[in-house]
Image (cartoon, rainbow, N blue to C red):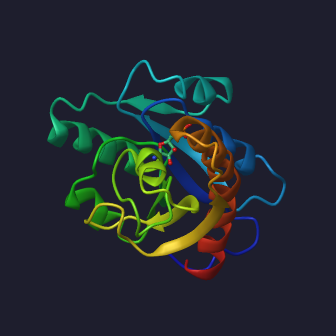
Amino acid sequence: MGKLSGKKKLVVSVFISGRGTNLNSLIEFSKKKNSPIQIALVICNNKNAKGLNYAKKHKINFLVVNYKNKNKAENKILISLKKNKISLICLAGFMKVLSRKIINIYKNKILNIHPSLLPRYKGLNTHSRVIKNKDRFTGCTVHLVNSKLDSGKIILQKRIKVFKKDNEYSLAKRVLKVENLIYPIAIRKFIETTL
Ligand code: GRF
């Protein structure tokens, strides 16, 4: 994939599992005048995910896949990605680990947002671990996805203070707002500097 020139937008698929606030933020971003992306497909492993409503509202193609059989699920996903000519995948609260197959096909073309200051707190329950360790700062990270969990190259990170009165819920709420804010910025940065 060469440099983006003129008005050509990068065709993106967003993967979700639940609420979808990051998806919503990316959709809003894609609708901005100078946005470098177009969201052509939403992939979801949970038919009851609230986030699917954003895809419906904005008439974006979506595919719900049953992950009971991971191999079958990923084959379906790959067919759909190809059909929709997807060049970039943005994981946004997608709770499944992608297999090497997809990661290799979309090498350096998969981004994820994680609610911690990576490399600290890979995996789940980041906010409760921050509280338990009495950390003074936390934040969120947009990074490239490789075959190791939450370990790919960091594209953008934003730090916020942890207050004494914070608990995991108040922290999750504040970090999420920052996530929604930085994901589009990170995508723009990634496209302008890396692709
Ligand atoms: C976010 O905190 C994201 O960092 C994590 O899962 C959450 C998804 O939130 N991986 P939403 O579905 O985008 O609202």
Residue 191 horizontal/vertical position (percent): 61, 72
Q: Quadrant of residue 76?
A: top left
Work out whether residue 86 can be spotted. Answer: no
In the depicted view, which residue is nearer to us: 187 or 182?
A: 182
Residue 66 located left or right of residue 42: left
Work out whether residue 110 can be spotted. Answer: yes
Relative height, residue 63 to residue 153 (above, below): above
Residue 131 horizontal/vertical position (percent): 48, 49
In the depicted view, which residue is nearer to us: 100 or 161?
A: 161
Residue 113 horizontal/vertical position (percent): 50, 55
Q: Residue at x 62, y 54 (%)?
A: 162
Residue 143 horizontal/vertical position (percent): 48, 66
Q: Residue at x 59, y 30 (%)?
A: 55
Q: Residue at x 61, y 43 (%)?
A: 166
| Residue that sits furthest to the right in the current view | 33
Relative height, residue 193 to residue 149 (above, below): below
Residue 192 located left or right of residue 121: right
In the depicted view, which residue is nearer to us: 79 or 148?
A: 148
